[in-house]
Amino acid sequence: MERLQKIIANCGVCSRRKAENLIIEGKVKVNGVVVKELGTKVGEKDKIEVLGKVLEKQQPIYILLNKPRGVVTTVSDDKNRKTVVDLIDIEERIYPIGRLDYDTTGVLLLTNDGEFSNLMMHPRNEIDKVYVAKLNKKIEANDIKNLKSGVMIDNVKVKADRVKLRKVNSDGTCIVELTIHEGKNHQVKKMFLSLGYLVDKLKRERVAFLTVDNLKSGEYRNLTLKEVHQLYALANKNN
Ligand code: URA
C-alpha cells in the first residue's frame, strides 16, 4: 500500500504537490469514489482516476543524456526545433528534469517519475549541479567571492555553492567551475552577467555524482537501479 499522491506522481502525471492539490480539489477517484483525504493508502488492485482518466501504472524510467548544443530542453517545441526527447528512442512519455539552454551541453536527466524529478530540482535537497563556463575575460578574485556571497538576478539573491577558476587562456578568456543547487532560468549566465562577464560556452559537467564522461554528445543511457536509489537517498538526506 502506498500514499495516493505518491502513486499519482510516480505515474508521471504531475508532481506530488500538484497531486495533493488535485486530491484536495476532489479531482481524484479511487474505485469510483472521490477521495479528498491526503495520505489515503491505495494498493496494486485499486483503480485510480485523475481528472476522469484512469491512471496507467508505468515502469519508472531514468535516463542520463549528454545534451548536445542546438537542441531544446522541452517535450515539444512550437518552432519545430529538435528537442531532447527526440533524441531518446523509447515509446514511453518522459520529460527533462530542469532545463539546459539551447546552446548548453552536458548532463541532463529525463524521467517519467514526478517525485524523482521534484527531488532532483528542489534547492532544499542540495543536489549539486556543476557547470563549467568559458567567460569572455578573466574573472577577478573579488568576483569569485561575490558569486559565493550572492548576486542579484531578476531581483532575487542567488549564491554559488562553490566557484573555482580552472584556467586562464592565452587570449584572455577563462574557464570557471561553478556549483549551484538551484535551476532558475539562465541562472549561470545571469549570475556571471550581473558581474559583467559573458558566458561564451556552458557545459553542465555533473549532477550529484553523475557525469557524461562515457557518453558522446547526443548519447544516453539508463541509470542503474543502484544509481536511482543513491540519488533518492542523497536528496532525502537533506529533506
Ligand atoms: N544556467 C544557464 O544560464 N544556462 C543553462 O543552460 C543552465 C544553467
Image (cartoon, rainbow, N blue to C red):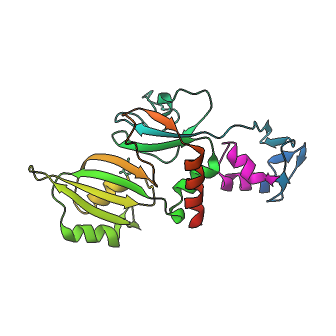
The percent coordinates of residue 47 (x first, y second) are: 85, 41
Q: Is residue 13 above or below residue 150?
A: above
Q: Is residue 32 above or below residue 40?
A: above
219 to the left or right of 11 = left
Region of the chain picked out in magenta, as a range: 1-22
Front residue of 97/233: it is 233
The percent coordinates of residue 129 (x first, y second) are: 42, 55
The answer to whether any part of residue 25 appears in the image is: no
Residue 232 colored magenta?
no
Identity of the residue drawn at 27% across and 71% down: 145
Identity of the residue drawn at 56% across and 60% down: 235
Quadrant assignment for the C terminus: bottom right
The percent coordinates of residue 101 (x first, y second) are: 38, 43
17 to the left or right of 211 = right
The percent coordinates of residue 59 (x first, y second) are: 68, 38
For this orientation, the residue located farthest to the front is 226
Front residue of 41/59: it is 59
Identity of the residue drawn at 44% across and 55% down: 184
